[in-house]
């Protein structure tokens, strides 16, 4: 891509963003679209528009986002979302403080040298304009061994110091947010429970419940309340799922019948009983579904009793009347052997992954290592196709590989568009295939909670995109473009890789611009969810439950959003000194992201869980990982530039490792466990222990006769 194509692509991205922003300003004021643009407010029983939609300024959302406080975000979307904005503002601060020094100092120093011309003269090549304008604003324009490199060396230290300072400050702030939330006067069920795994074999004549109750009563005689032994719910979940499915079908059939009555004489809906409703006997849907529901309800009640009595597993939830005791129990070693009586904090009831609770200690370790190996192989082998894509998705290579495309790609207007967008779009589409696979792998490890699975998948995705997108595109593009030169002079590979960094910055400039202009434009406008909702409402939805399912937005999806942000952090940090012109693009990405996502957090996304900021330590360590990669990159680049004082940079990577160690020792413990001084804060209301206990019962084990069934089962020493 030449410089004119680069400017064209930026202009196009900006126009797309403006169009999407105008679309949002218009569509979000339509009454029928409120459930798409204000679902979080609607779920909480609030009015979508403050002051009414007719008098609403089309750009009022900007003022509302900017004027909102951190407490507003917590009230609407919880601590996890507030912590995400701490991450965005921290990275934004790092880039702004870095840019204030780097841009006015390094750009003039680079622009007034003539390293590019000398390199062109030495290699007997003419540039033809490719990258030359941008190269003159980067370290590529600095002569080898030049004293000007001192400025870039000092700048490397400045970026590192700013990052250390702001991430440490943010860690303290998030720790305070977490402590404040956990000290809340509101009763949180998970604070009164612990998860106990790896139960040893029960003695003869003793049930699992008796075993657990006896054990914990002896250790915590005054505060032990009750236990709930985990059961194998596979069969009961299956029946419950079928029952819920028929209830939805019945509600839909009744809604269809009610609509037909409104048009005159009502017509009762019918369906066929055969495969997928395409064949078999035709029956009255309402009567058929009622019969199925009655049959499955009886079957479910019978299976619930069998499950509670006969399918007890080797793990349990234990409840205490004091949250201090629960916090102590979660931090204590309860048995001589590490694979017996493993006690940890209980996740929120909605987060529990019941099928993972019964996986044994050594099985979990084996699964973890197997998953690590699979992820490693995935990273390694995905680099091959991504490197191939980065090299092949250029017009020059496409014309060679697919000659029949020549008449198409030679069209001037189309050529400009393809050169600007093709590699970035191909890369983004290729990456979109991965997240669900990584979520599956994380769940396979045996992790007990949904938020922990998301954190684990986020980590895997981060390392994947850093190695495959950042390193893969940089190295892959160079290797494919210069394979002949490498064959002739194998020793030149390291020189080429180092010298290619400024050139590859243009690709990443366009990539970042695509992400913040088009990506955040689509995020704000919600055009795709809007179209899907209206199609479903018109052709599929027949009742309120189906309508709610059609517009319900879900959460902010940290599993993919955080790693994508981390990729931008890595790119901008690694090129911040080599090509400082990338810093404004990084600032725009995080500033625009903060603004757009602030609006979405306050009005759109509905949190699926609350982990009280447990994601932050993972965010912080990955910011430092990106910084570490940047420091090593700069160390190598200064070496290629043959700067005599390059060893001055050696302490930086070591300092980063020390910084991570200090932060982990100082802060991390309070994120792994509930601190006792926090748990000891008094509650305004006395916790209703039976209600806390019932909040953990799986939906498939709750029936219309819950009160009687649970009390009878409990008296007969069942798992509940």
Image (cartoon, grey):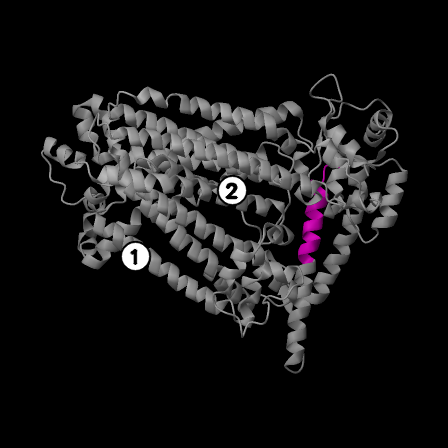
Left or right of residue 576: residue 80: right
Closer to the camera, 490 or 569? 569
Residue at left offset 21%, top offset 53%: 409
Disc tally is: 2
Q: Is residue 390 among the parts visible in the rendering?
A: no
Residue 596, horizontal then vertical, whole percent: 48, 55
Look at the image and give the residue range highlighted in magenta: 230-246
SS at circle 1: helix
Closer to the camera, 547 or 257? 547
- Residue 643, placed above or below residue 460: above
Q: Which residue is mark 2?
A: 87
Q: Which residue is mark 1?
A: 11
Snapshot quadrant of residue 542: bottom right
The secondary structure making up most of the magenta span is: helix
Residue at left offset 62%, top offset 54%: 76
Instruction: Answer whether residue 235 is magenta in the image.
Output: yes
Residue 621, horizontal then vertical, whole percent: 51, 32
Identify the mark nearer the N-term, 1 or 2: 1
Q: Is residue 514 among the parts visible in the rendering?
A: yes
List the single residue furthest toward the bottom.
Answer: 264
Closer to the camera, 683 or 382? 683
């Amino acid at each position: 891509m030449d410089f004119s194509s680069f400017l064209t692509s930026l202009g196009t991205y900006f126009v797309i963003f403006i169009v999407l922003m105008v679309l949002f300003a218009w569509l979000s004021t339509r009454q029928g679209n409120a459930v798409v643009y204000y679902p979080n407010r609607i779920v909480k029983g609030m009015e979508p528009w403050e002051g009414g939609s007719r008098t609403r300024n089309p750009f009022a959302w900007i003022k509302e986002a900017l004027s909102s406080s951190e407490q507003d975000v917590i009230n609407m979307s919880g601590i996890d979302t507030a912590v995400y904005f701490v991450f965005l503002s921290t990275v934004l601060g790092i880039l702004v403080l870095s840019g204030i020094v780097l841009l006015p100092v390094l750009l003039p120093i680079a622009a007034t040298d003539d390293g590019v011309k000398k390199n062109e003269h030495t290699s007997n090549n003419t540039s033809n304009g490719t990258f030359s304008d941008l190269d003159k604003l980067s370290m590529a324009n600095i002569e080898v061994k030049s004293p000007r490199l001192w400025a870039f060396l000092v700048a490397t230290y400045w970026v590192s110091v700013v990052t250390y300072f702001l991430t440490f400050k943010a860690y303290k702030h998030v720790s305070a947010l977490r402590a404040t939330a956990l000290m809340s006067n509101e009763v949180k069920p998970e604070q009164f429970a612990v998860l106990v795994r790896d139960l040893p074999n029960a003695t003869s004549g003793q049930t699992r419940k008796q075993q657990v109750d006896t054990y914990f009563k002896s250790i915590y005689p005054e505060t032990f309340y009750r236990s709930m032994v985990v059961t194998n719910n596979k069969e009961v979940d299956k029946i419950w799922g079928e029952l819920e499915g028929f209830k939805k079908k019945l509600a839909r059939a009744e809604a269809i019948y009610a609509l037909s009555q409104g048009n005159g004489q009502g017509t009762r809906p019918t369906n066929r009983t055969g495969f997928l409703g395409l064949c078999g006997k035709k029956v009255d849907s309402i009567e058929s579904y009622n019969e199925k529901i009655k049959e499955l309800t009886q079957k479910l009640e019978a299976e619930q009793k069998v499950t509670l009595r006969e399918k007890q597993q080797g793990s349990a939830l234990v409840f205490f009347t004091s949250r201090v005791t629960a916090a102590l129990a979660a931090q204590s070693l309860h048995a001589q052997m590490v694979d017996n009586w493993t006690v940890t904090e209980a996740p929120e009831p909605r987060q529990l992954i019941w099928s993972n609770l019964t996986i044994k200690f050594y099985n979990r370790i084996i699964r973890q290592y197997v998953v690590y190996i699979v992820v490693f192989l995935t990273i390694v082998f995905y680099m091959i196709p991504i490197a191939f894509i980065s090299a092949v998705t250029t017009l020059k290579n496409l014309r060679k590989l697919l000659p029949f495309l020549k008449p198409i790609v030679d069209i001037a207007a189309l050529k400009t568009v393809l050169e600007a967008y093709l590699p970035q779009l191909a890369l983004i589409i290729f990456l979109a295939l991965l997240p669900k696979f990584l979520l599956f792998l994380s769940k396979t490890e045996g992790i007990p909670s949904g938020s922990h699975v998301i954190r684990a998948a986020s980590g895997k995705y981060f390392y994947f995109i850093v190695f495959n997108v950042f390193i893969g595109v940089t190295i892959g593009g160079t290797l494919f473009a210069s394979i002949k030169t490498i064959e002739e002079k194998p020793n030149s590979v390291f020189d080429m890789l180092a010298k290619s960094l400024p050139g590859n910055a243009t690709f990443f400039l366009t990539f970042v611009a695509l992400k913040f202009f088009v990506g955040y434009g689509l995020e704000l406008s919600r055009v795709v969810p809007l179209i899907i909702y209206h199609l479903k409402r018109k052709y599929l939805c027949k009742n309120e439950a189906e309508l709610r399912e059609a517009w319900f937005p879900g959460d902010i999806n940290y599993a993919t959003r955080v790693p994508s942000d981390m990729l931008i952090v890595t790119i901008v940090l690694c090129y911040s000194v080599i090509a400082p012109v990338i810093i404004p693009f990084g600032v725009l990405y995080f500033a625009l992201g903060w603004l757009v996502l602030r609006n979405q957090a306050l009005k759109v996304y509905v949190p699926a869980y609350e982990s009280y900021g447990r994601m932050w330590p993972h965010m912080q360590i990955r910011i430092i990982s990106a910084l570490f990669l940047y420091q090593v990159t700069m160390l190598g680049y200064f070496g290629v530039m043959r700067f005599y004082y390059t060893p001055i940079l050696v302490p930086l990577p070591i300092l980063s490792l020390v910084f991570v160690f200090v932060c982990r020792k100082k802060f991390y413990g309070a994120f792994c466990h509930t601190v006792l001084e926090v748990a000891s804060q008094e509650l305004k209301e006395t916790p209703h222990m039976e209600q806390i206990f019932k909040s953990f019962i799986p939906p498939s084990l709750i029936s219309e006769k819950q009160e009687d069934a649970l009390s009878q089962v409990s008296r007969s020493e069942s798992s509940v």
